Image (tube, grey):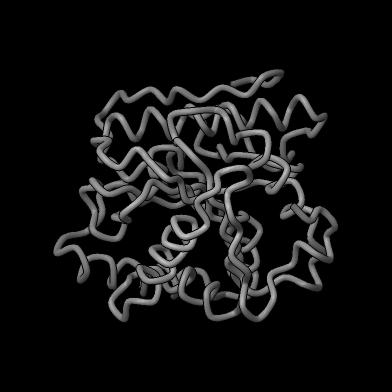
Amino acid sequence: MQTSDTAFRPGPHAHLCALRGCGEPHLDEELEESLRGLIARTDFPCVGAKAALAQSGLRIETAGDITSPADDARIQRALARWSRMPATNEADFRSLTVVYHGPRDLDEPAFEAALWARLSSISAEDAERGFAPDPGFSTDPQDPHFALSFGGRAYFAVGLHPNASRRARRLPFPAIVFNLHNQFEKLRAEDRYERMREVILARDEAFDGEPNPMLARHGEVSEARQYSGREVEDGWSCPFFRPGTNA
C-alpha cells in the first residue's frame, strides 16, 4: 500500500483499493461499486456524500470481516494519513469509507455490536501509536460533545449494512463511513450548515417515508446514538472505550 500523503490523495478517479492479501480483487471492486452506486442514486438523501463522490473526495478501503479485528491496524493507519492531508488539498466534502466483505446477515443489534467493537479497537490502535484525541471534543460517548478521534482529528461515523431499517443505511455489504468533523464546522462558519441540514432531512424523509428519529445537532445529545443507524432506546449505553481517556 502506498503510504506517502501525496500518493494517498484521491485522484480524479479514486483507484480501487484491493484488500491486502485477500486475493479477491473482483469482490473488492464489487464492494466499492456497491457504495458508489448507492450514493449516485438520484434520490439518495445525503448531499454531502454525493458532493464527496463528485469532488473525488471519497476514499474507499476494503476489509474482511467486520466482526474481526484483523484489519483494524491498517484502517487506523489509513485514517491517520487521511487526518493529516493538507487542508489546501481538501475537497469541500471528504469521506473515508471502509467496506467489509461480510458478514451480510447481521441484524441491527449484531451490526451495532460489530460497529462499536471495530471503532473501539481502531481507537485503541490510534492511542497505542501515540495520537491524542482531538482536544475540541469529548471521548466519553455519553457526552453531547463526543466524537471519535483518529490521527488527532475528530470524526463522525456512519454505519451501513444490508439489514438496516433506514433505507439510506442499506448497503449490500457492511461499511463504516468516517467524516471529518471540521467539514461541519466549515459549513457553520460559512452559514451553509443549517440549509444543508434541512435539505438532507427533507430528502431522507422522502427517501424513507418518515423522519429519522435519531438525528440531532452536535452538542444536544451524544452523536454516538446515530452511528449504527438503529433506533436506540432510552437509557442506551454506548459500548465504546478509548484507552487512556475519560471514556
> In the image, residue 105 lies at what x, y percent?
25, 38
Residue at the image position 82 percent from the left and 29 percent from the top:
130
Please name whichever residue, 83 or 75, is drawn nearer the observer in this view of the structure: 75
Please name whichever residue, 53 or 211, is drawn nearer the observer in this view of the structure: 53
In the image, residue 177 sits, relative to residue 233, either above or below, namely below
In this view, the residue farthest toward the left is 209
Left or right relative to 187: residue 196: left
Q: Is residue 142 visible?
A: no
Q: Is residue 67 visible?
A: yes
Can you tell which quarter of the image residue 87 is in?
bottom right
Residue at the image position 81 percent from the left and 73 percent from the top:
88
Q: How many numbered circles does the render carry?
A: 0
Can you tell which quarter of the image residue 107 is in?
top left
Left or right relative to 114: residue 79: right
> In the image, residue 128 lies at what x, y percent?
76, 24
In the image, residue 12 sits, relative to residue 139, either above or below, namely below
Please name whichever residue, 236 or 191, is drawn nearer the observer in this view of the structure: 236
In the image, residue 188 sits, relative to residue 157, either above or below, namely below
Residue at the image position 38 percent from the left and 46 percent from the top:
174
> In the image, residue 145 lies at what x, y percent?
56, 39
> In the image, residue 221 lies at what x, y percent?
43, 39
Left or right relative to 133: residue 105: left
